[in-house]
């Protein structure tokens, strides 16, 4: 039923809440880290209202935020699945491909009048090595692989969408967080610096993103429930 419900999403209005939930996640993580968010909350409201009305003629700053959010979600699934067991990757191949297609199609409508918008490239396992071995070689269980993948990729997702939405994310913070995150989740580091731990705890609030998407789009999904439980458990552990 989850896939059938997702098949109905194809218009800008269908993705208004999808964008809103992602943008609110960006705002809350940024604000939690003390980053300057300006009037981002009010801009999210305006963009969401326009999407619900089926409008794509947004001011450049709003159009860029919408396009970046949807585009980042579109290209997130495939690299994430590559961090996971093969059975998981194969099982999600078809729904991921469909979501990728629809999200990109709507994102392009908002990016059409922008001078430039680069698609993000999220890390694959072969991009992240620890002591000469892929980071995935240091984790065994499904949950541990899921947490490692999310810890790396939601950092990259947030950094891209926040910056395209006009929120400055300090490069040094991102660099330190990535380095410490990989070491921590592969057993090469016992703890995280306080600001890095706070950053990852906020990023792991994507369990709420999963729950809110499932609720708004009526996705009665055991898989979504599993994702949310794993993410929530790690968020609480970091607290």
Image (tube, rainbow, N blue to C red):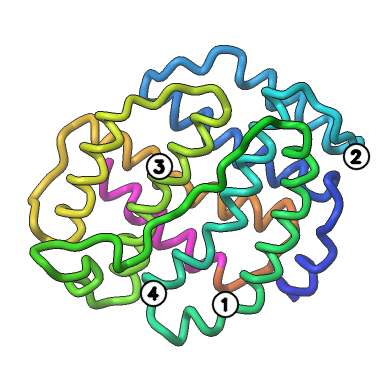
Relative depth, front residue between 147 and 84? 84
Which residue is depicted at the point 29% across and 61% down? 127
Q: Image check: 228 left or right of 182?
A: right
178 versus 103 height, above or below: above
Which residue is depicted at the point 76% across and 65% down? 6
Q: Earlier in the sequence, mark 2 or mark 4?
A: 2
Relative depth, front residue between 39 and 142? 39
Relative depth, front residue between 190 and 153? 153
Q: Residue tagged by mark 3?
A: 203
Q: Residue tagged by mark 2?
A: 54
Residue 92 numbered mark, or none: 1
Gap in angstroms between the C-alphas marked 2 and 4: 36 Å
Q: Earlier in the sequence, mark 3 or mark 4?
A: 4
Gap in angstroms between the C-alphas marked 3 and 4: 20 Å
Q: Residue tagged by mark 4?
A: 84
Tell me, yes or no, whether the highlighted magenta stretch contains residue 220.
Answer: no
Gap in angstroms between the C-alphas marked 1 and 4: 11 Å
Q: Residues within 10 Å of mark 1 (few under 14, many from 20)?
A: few
Residue 84 pos. (x, y %): 39, 74
């Amino acid at each position: 039923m989850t896939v059938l419900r997702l098949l109905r999403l194809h218009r800008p209005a269908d993705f208004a809440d999808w964008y809103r939930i992602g943008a609110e996640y960006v705002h809350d993580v940024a604000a939690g880290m003390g980053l300057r968010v300006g009037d981002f909350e009010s801009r999210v409201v305006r963009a969401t209202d326009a999407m619900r009305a089926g409008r794509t003629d947004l001011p450049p700053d709003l159009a860029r935020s919408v396009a970046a959010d949807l585009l980042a979600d579109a290209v997130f699934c495939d690299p994430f699945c590559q961090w996971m067991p093969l059975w998981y990757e194969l099982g999600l191949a078809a729904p991921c491909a469909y979501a990728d297609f629809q999200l990109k199609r709507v994102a392009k409508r908002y990016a059409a009048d922008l001078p430039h918008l680069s698609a993000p490239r999220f890390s694959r396992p072969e991009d992240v090595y620890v002591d000469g071995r892929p980071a995935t070689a240091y984790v065994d269980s499904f949950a541990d692989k899921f947490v490692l993948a999310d810890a790396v990729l939601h950092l990259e997702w947030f950094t891209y969408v926040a910056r395209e939405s006009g929120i400055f994310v300090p490069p040094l913070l991102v660099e330190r967080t990535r380095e410490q995150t990989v070491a921590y989740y592969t057993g090469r580091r016992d703890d995280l610096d306080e600001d890095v731990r706070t950053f990852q705890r906020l990023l792991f609030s994507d369990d709420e993103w999963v729950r809110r998407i499932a609720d708004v789009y009526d996705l009665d999904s055991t898989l979504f429930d599993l994702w949310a439980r794993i993410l929530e458990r790690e968020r609480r552990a970091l607290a």
